[in-house]
Image (cartoon, coloured by chain):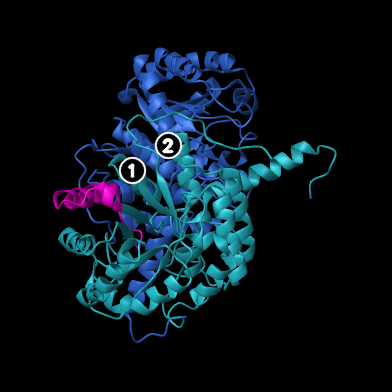
Chain colours: A cyan, B blue
């Protein structure tokens, strides 16, 4: 197969390498209408690793009734076999845990990296976590402590860092105070979520600067942008310009069915890779293999991938196929 | 109607104001399968002006058989009435002219700003202009001279500045030499086109830097990105970071039907406005009115707007509508 890559022109102002925290199997599939079988999810994870991604978030140990799409977390980890307990060098397969029972389920599966998830706003905490923002942080405290003492890596997600559908503007001081609490309780990294995709590069600047002033520098942070307003890639690149080295993305841009109102997907991993490879920032990703995986997952989900790079490279691959067999009449 | 705007966080490193060169009626409609009536095109231009855009490229005086969608340039300008010969302060309504007969048609219509269009590559010049790159530049020389002596503003487009579908990589030296020629013959501005949407921010850096070294600074340049690989907004913002103050965009992201292979639209004006308003850069655009216009144009074209902001704000407006009339049962 022909390799399709952007022209490479290294930017000296962009620090690499960048770690892509692949959230497709968890944040992506969690928000898709189609329910995917556990062994297919495990295949998805394996294909993402084969494409060069090193951190692939697998699933979530929330109550199965909360997120039916991820009710099979145990089955997915079991289908991944020895990869989970003895991962190859540099490979991480994290899972979300909402509380201590969730952490125990994760430990039983051999999971080595867990993520808790907090909210920057009161409204979203009550709707998504069924608790006040403060109560949710209290619940996480023993979870983080136990996870750390078991030698696990711990990441915290903070939702609604750039805007909230019920509250509108989110004060930066609120985001900072939640992040301080999470770092204070021992989380290794906080991923700043733009859950509704409203952020702009100006907001990225001001939030990262507010966090920096509070002593929470880029080395403790990751960014997680949704593409609802078309800003996800621009915001992610801005964060990288400002020193962030871990960024979240979802293979094929899955998550949030485009046919459902008000739900849209994460930044597509392929669109991010195109941007980074072109700017000379190493990602370790084999873009052709990743696109192949996303084309396959799109067929599983029964809808085209929202990723522009997937769409463009899938067309280019079709065209290559035709050029290679000029005697054939294309359908 | 509720106003939906991003949180405003001014970036001190972004110079404003930015002039948006709206290309929807020309570059957008030229690439749409649906043929739109002249009076509807004129309405489109009027609505774009009402939304605060100041430069709206109206049509093209190429041979009607070349671009059937724009064969009615005279009718569109005539439907615009006095706006063309006596435009309000700051308003510009440019048109493309490929040669001297085209320029005469434009002058007959009262057009005050014209654009010529060159190619950075030999392959595209032969396919699109039906001439060698050099011959095309020769054809433009008297056109630019006549236009300037008639007191018109003259812009030059250069296609395939960042990659060519037949040639692949495009040497920066080739782009620089074509731009030097165009500036040398008197063009006021050169718009650097990423016709196939492959550029990344690294390439923006290196091309602008090569042009700068040749004495062609940002004040002589504009950028024109297509979103084929999802990079258009990131690249445009990068160009603005580097001092560019005129950027091309298409209302609703029209141009290049998403249902046709290998054709995709321009950067959507709305997605650009969201990014700039959020970062504190003035555009003068009323985003709600612009979205309303793009929703209307999408209905004319019979397909949803590819702009993420249009999609998101159209959903938000529907939701507002429902909230305002809680007694009604939504369909």
User: Tag 2, which secondary structure?
Assistant: loop
The total number of labels drawn is 2
Residue situated in front as seen by the camera: B145 or A224? A224
Percent x, y of residue B150: 38, 19
Task: Please tell me the numbered disc located at residue A281.
Answer: 2
Foreground: B20 or B5? B5
Residue at 23% in and 72% down: A137
Mark 1 vs 2: CB contact within 8 A: yes
Disc 1 residue crowd, few under 14, some 14–19, many 20+, Cα 10 Å: many
Residue pictured at 64% horizontal, 29% vertical: B166
The answer to whether one can see residue B169 in this image is: yes
| Residue at the image position 57 percent from the left and 30 percent from the top | B62
**Distance of label 1 from label 2 (alpha carbons):** 10 Å
**Start-end of magenta stretch:** A195-221
Q: Tell me which numbered mark, 1 or 2, is placed earlier along the sequence.
A: 1
Q: Position of residue A33 (x, y in %)?
A: 53, 72
Q: Does the stretch in magenta take in A213?
A: yes
The residue at the far right in this view is A327
Chain ID at mark 2: A
């Amino acid at each position: 197969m022909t390799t399709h890559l952007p022209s490479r022109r290294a930017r000296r102002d962009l620090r690499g390498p960048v770690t892509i925290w692949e959230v497709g199997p968890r944040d992506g599939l969690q928000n898709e209408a189609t329910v995917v079988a556990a062994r297919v999810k495990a295949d998805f994870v394996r294909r993402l690793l084969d494409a060069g991604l090193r951190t692939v978030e697998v699933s979530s140990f929330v109550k199965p009734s909360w997120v039916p799409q991820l009710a099979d977390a145990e089955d997915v980890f079991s289908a991944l076999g020895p990869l989970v307990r003895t991962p190859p060098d540099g490979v991480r397969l994290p899972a979300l845990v909402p509380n201590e029972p969730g952490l125990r389920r994760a430990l039983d599966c051999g999971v080595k990296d867990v993520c808790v998830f907090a909210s920057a706003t009161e409204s979203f905490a009550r709707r998504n976590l069924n608790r006040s923002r403060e109560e949710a942080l209290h619940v996480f405290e023993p979870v983080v402590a136990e996870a750390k003492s078991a030698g696990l890596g711990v990441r915290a997600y903070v939702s609604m860092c750039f805007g909230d559908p019920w509250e509108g503007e989110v004060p930066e001081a609120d985001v900072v105070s939640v992040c301080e609490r999470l770092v204070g309780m021992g989380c290794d990294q906080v991923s700043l979520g733009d859950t509704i995709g409203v952020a702009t590069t100006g907001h990225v600047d001001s939030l990262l600067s507010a966090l920096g002033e509070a002593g929470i520098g880029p080395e403790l942070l990751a960014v997680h942008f949704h593409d609802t307003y078309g800003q996800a890639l621009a915001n992610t690149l801005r964060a990288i310009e400002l020193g962030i080295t871990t960024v979240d993305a979802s293979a094929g841009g899955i998550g949030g069915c485009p046919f459902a109102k008000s739900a849209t997907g994460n930044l597509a991993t392929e669109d991010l890779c195109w941007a980074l490879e072109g700017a000379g920032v190493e990602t370790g990703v084999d873009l052709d293999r990743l696109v192949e995986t996303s084309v396959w997952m799109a067929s599983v989900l029964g809808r085209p991938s929202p990723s522009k790079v997937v769409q463009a490279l899938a067309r280019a691959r079709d065209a290559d196929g035709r050029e290679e067999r000029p005697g054939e009449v294309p359908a």
